[in-house]
Structures are given as structure tokens and as C-alpha cells.
Image: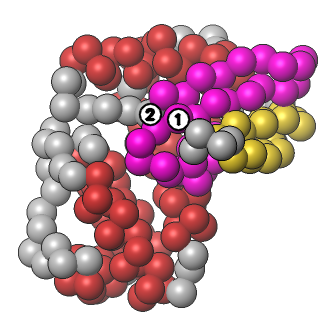
Amino acid sequence: MYGIFHVEIQHYIETQYGRDLWTAILKRAGLKNRIYMTVSTYLDSEVVEIMKAASDLTGVPVETLLEDFGAFIVPSLMNTYEPLIDPKWSMADLLLNLEEAVYRVIRTRSPGAHPPRMTFERVGPHQLRLHYDSPRRLPALAVGFVKGIAVYYDETVDVQTQKNPDGSVDIMITMITYG
């Protein structure tokens, strides 16, 4: 996984729970003294171990932490990838163009980065379906990401998930208010 996520997880934990907890999480995850760099790549398993340790130490379920983190990281990602995002886009436009405008560029420029396959399609005037498929199996992160984008665009959304037999997840996004 691309290092920006590890760095942002550290920022999330330190912002929400304090620096001491980050140190305790790394120790519990078997990653004591680990330092993450945004442009490096790390094992996906490290994110899983960090989130499990964070859950153990905070009492917050892993799925909730992942969703909260997904929303937390949006402003940073929007800033980082701003040149790839049309300023005229709505939330729906961004989501519908995410794979082509952002993830394709990430895969081309950063061969070590393997963002999930997230396919969006419009299924109604105010509804999108996100088909999330990733070997990481972190759909809660995608749900948080969608909710964070809604906040970024000053929109209110209802998000429902459905797990598929193949391990992928369909996420229905209903836009309730528009910024």
C-alpha cells in the first residue's frame, strides 16, 4: 500500500487520540519505531495490524476506525490530487470520474501503488452505485471516503452496503442534499 495512507493513519490517530496512543499502537502491532514515508510502499498487512491494535487500545471497532479514517483523509487527498480534479465537478461527477481521472494516473505514475478498483455508476438522478473490489477487503474505508467527499462538497448522503458472494461490495450512495 502506498505510504501516504500509513502517514495519514498516523496523523488520524494522533489527531483523534494523541501521539502516545500512536506509539502504543505501533508497539502492539509489532511495528515499534516504524517510520512511514509518503512516497514509499508498505505491506497491506501493516495497515490491518495497526487498525486491529488501534481497535484493541481504543475499544472502537476496526470497521468504525476505517470508516472514520476514510472520511478524515479526504481533505488531504483532495489537496494532493487537486490538479486532477475539475473544479466544476459536483460530488457525483468526482465519483463517476474517479477511476479515470485519479486512479489511472496514480497507477501510471506510481507503479508501487495499487488503489482499489472502485467502479461508480449512476442508477438514478440522485443515486450512485459503487462496486468496490480490492484484495485488501477494506470496504469501510471506501464508505468513509464517500462520506468524507460528501462533507467536502457540503452534501448529505445515505450510504448502504451489500456484500457479494465473491467478496466485493456494492455501496449504494443516495445524495439527499446538494452543496
Q: Nearer the viewer, residue 169 or 24?
A: 169
Using the rendered image of the protein, determine whether residue 5 is visible from the camera's viewpoint: yes
Above or below for 72 versus 98? below
Judging by the rendered image, the residue that carries numbered circle 1 is 133
Residue that appears at 74% across and 28% down: 129
Q: Where is residue 140 in the image (x, y as percent from the top left)?
A: 58, 53
Q: Nearer the viewer, residue 114 or 67?
A: 114
Residue that appears at 89% across and 37% down: 176
Q: Is 59 included in the stretch rendered in magenta?
A: no
Q: In screen coordinates, is 108 left or right of 133?
A: left
Quadrant in which residue 80 is drawn: top left
Q: Is 122 included in the stretch rendered in magenta?
A: yes
Residue that appears at 30% across and 80% down: 25
Above or below for 57 versus 32? below
Comes first in the chain, label 2 or label 1 = 2
Q: Where is residue 40 in the image (x, y as percent from the top left)?
A: 13, 42
User: Which residues are drawn in magenta?
Assistant: 117-146
Judging by the rendered image, the residue that carries numbered circle 2 is 116
Amino acid type at mark 2: Pro
SS state under label 2:
loop
Above or below for 29 versus 134? below
User: Do the residues bearing badges 2 and 1 touch, measured as CB atoms within 8 Å?
Assistant: yes
Residue that appears at 18% across and 78% down: 30
Q: Position of residue 20 (x, y in %)?
A: 28, 86
Could you classify mark 2 by the number of other residues whose Cα lies within 10 Å: few (under 14), some (14-19), or many (20 or more)?
Answer: some
